[in-house]
Structure formats: structure tokens, C-alpha cells
């Protein structure tokens, strides 16, 4: 069953008298319980698409719907507060706070129903992601990059949302940390019935997802042979065949 939908999304910016399309008639559906990737080279518009799915920006035309409701009808701020957890490549943690405090801040602003003991829940969530109580009480600046990314994931999960969006979350991590993070995303989808969407330029990550889309020339298509459901029945695509996306320019 469709949980999240991008419907006829267009996004462009004005370049003199030209409209430079970053996204053109983008359509996609996402379900809970699956780990998705959106594959594209740098500058392909994948981060722009993620920002639209996260209600951090607004499309020029088209709609994003969650459980049949449009973001515009819910309200962008309310959507971000109650419907989505966002994981950024640069973590975006509050640097003067501890790991625990970063998670608690997220819990304090949501309208979603949470257990009364926020602190205990936050500690347990961080522990589940490999951050011990001793590290949870440290300033985030005293944690490694991989640990900070785990704190960012805990913060995204702390508001009890079903939609998790991640922007190049492994970009600053080594291969070992990358593998661990992908396992976490897979577990969130399979074991906790979350809809997890990761934008990446990495074919290796895309191949580990349940379903992968690719972004090319402003168009989003199902990635051939890259983590695609077997029912799609398409042929594999080698890394060399992944094209470099460029914006479409329209007068």
C-alpha cells in the first residue's frame, strides 16, 4: 500500500530568460517496510527531491502526499514536526549539547504521542543504535563521525515517525561505518516497518536497497538491476551505465 507519493513534481530555477529544470514531472510511490535509494550523481537534483519529500522546500507544481494527504493540506511545519525524521550528511546536531540532549530536543517539539519518560526512551534509543549511556552524556563534539551519525538517526526516530529520509548519510564515513549504517536502515524498514529513503551517488548502497530509483536529466525512473523488486523483471545495469544527470533547460 502506498504510504508516500510524489505526484507530478516539477522544480526549476530561473536563469535569465530560461527555466532550468532540476526535476521534471517526477512521479514515485513508497511503502512502509521497505528501504529505498534514489541514485544520482552530484548535481542531479536528488537532494532537492529529498527536500521536497521532507517539506523543506515547495515544488513549482505537483504535490507530495503521505497516507493520501498532501503536505500543503497538513502544513509544512506540522509535517516536519510530526511526520518525518531527517538525517543529514553533515549531521546537523546542536554542537553545544550532549547526544542525549539532541534527542530530547526533537522529542520536545513533536505533537506525536510518546512515552512519558523521555529521558529513558532517548537513552534506550541511543543504546539500540550503539551509543552507550556514557557516550550519550558526552558533548556531540567528543564523538566520532560514525557516532554522531548514529545520534542523528536516534534524533530522527525519537519522534515516533514512520518516514525516515537521509541525505548522503554515509558520505563522511569509512567503509566499515557505511556497512553498519546500511544495516541499520535495512533493520528500520524490515523490523520496524519504517519507510526509509536514502539519496546517494553510491551504486554499492543502491544495490543493498529493496527498491532503487535513479535521477537523470530531471526524470526519476526505476533503477534497472539496482535493488529492484524481482517482480519488475528488468535487466542489470553496470556502474558504468549510470549516467551523469544534468538539468533540463527550457526557454
Image (tube, rainbow, N blue to C red):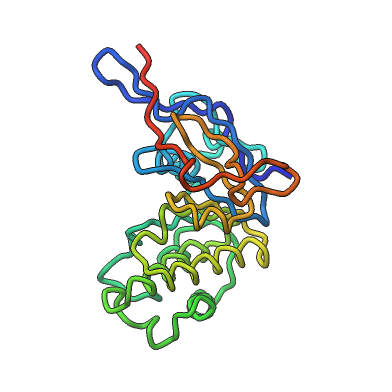
Residue 29 horizontal side relative to residue 16, left or right: right
Residue at x 27% of width, y 79% of height: 142
Instruction: Name the spot of residue 201 as percent of width and height, x first.
Output: 42, 49
Q: Along the line of sight, which residue is nearer the eye, 201 or 107?
A: 201
Instruction: Name the spot of residue 88 as percent of width and height, x first.
Output: 39, 56
Q: Quadrant of the C terminus?
A: top left
Residue at x 36% of width, y 19% of height: 249
Q: Along the line of sight, which residue is nearer the eye, 161 or 227?
A: 227
Instruction: Name the spot of residue 217 as percent of width and height, x first.
Output: 44, 29
Instruction: Name the spot of residue 24 as percent of width and height, x first.
Output: 48, 25
Residue 67 found in image quarter: top right
Residue 211 horizontal side relative to residue 216, left or right: right
Residue 38 horizontal side relative to residue 48, left or right: right
Q: How many marks?
A: 0
Residue at x 35% of width, y 62% of height: 91
Q: Is residue 251 above or below residue 102?
A: above
Q: Quadrant of the N terminus?
A: top right
Residue 155 found in image quarter: bottom left
Q: Is residue 102 above or below residue 236?
A: below
Q: Along the line of sight, which residue is nearer the eye, 80 or 49?
A: 49
Residue at x 49% of width, y 69% of height: 179
Residue 143 found in image quarter: bottom left
Q: Along the line of sight, which residue is nearer the eye, 51 or 112?
A: 51
Amino acid at each position: 500500500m502506498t504510504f508516500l507519493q510524489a505526484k507530478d513534481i516539477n522544480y526549476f530555477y530561473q536563469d535569465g530568460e530560461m527555466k532550468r529544470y532540476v526535476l521534471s514531472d517526477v512521479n514515485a510511490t513508497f511503502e512502509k517496510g521497505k528501504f529505498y535509494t534514489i541514485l544520482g550523481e552530484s548535481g542531479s537534483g536528488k537532494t532537492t527531491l529529498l527536500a521536497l519529500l521532507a517539506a523543506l522546500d515547495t515544488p513549482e507544481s505537483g504535490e507530495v502526499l503521505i497516507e493520501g494527504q498532501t503536505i500543503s493540506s497538513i502544513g509544512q511545519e506540522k509535517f516536519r514536526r510530526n511526520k518525518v525524521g531527517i538525517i543529514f550528511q553533515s549531521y546537523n546536531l546542536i554542537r553545544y549539547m550532549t547526544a542525549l540532549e539532541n534527542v530530547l530536543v526533537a522529542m520536545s517539539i513533536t505533537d506525536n504521542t510518546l512515552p512519558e519518560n523521555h529521558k529513558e526512551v532517548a537513552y534506550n534509543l541511543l543504546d539500540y543504535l550503539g551509543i552507550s549511556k556514557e557516550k550519550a552524556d558526552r558533548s556531540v563534539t567528543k564523538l566520532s563521525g560514525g557516532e554522531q551519525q548514529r545520534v542523528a538517526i536516534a534524533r530522527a526516530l525519537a519522534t515516533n515517525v514512520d518516514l525516515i529520509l537521509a541525505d548522503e548519510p554515509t558520505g563522511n564515513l569509512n567503509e566499515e561505518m557505511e556497512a553498519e549504517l546500511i544495516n541499520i536502515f535495512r533493520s528500520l524498514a524490515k523490523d520496524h516497518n519504517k519507510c526509509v529513503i536514502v539519496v546517494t551517488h553510491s551504486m554499492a548502497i543502491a544495490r543493498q536497497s529493496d527498491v532503487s530509483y535513479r535521477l537523470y536529466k530531471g526524470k526519476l525512473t526505476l533503477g534497472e538491476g539496482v535493488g529492484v523488486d524481482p517482480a519488475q523483471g528488468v535487466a542489470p545495469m553496470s556502474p558504468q551505465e549510470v549516467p551523469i544527470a544534468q538539468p533540463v533547460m527550457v526557454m
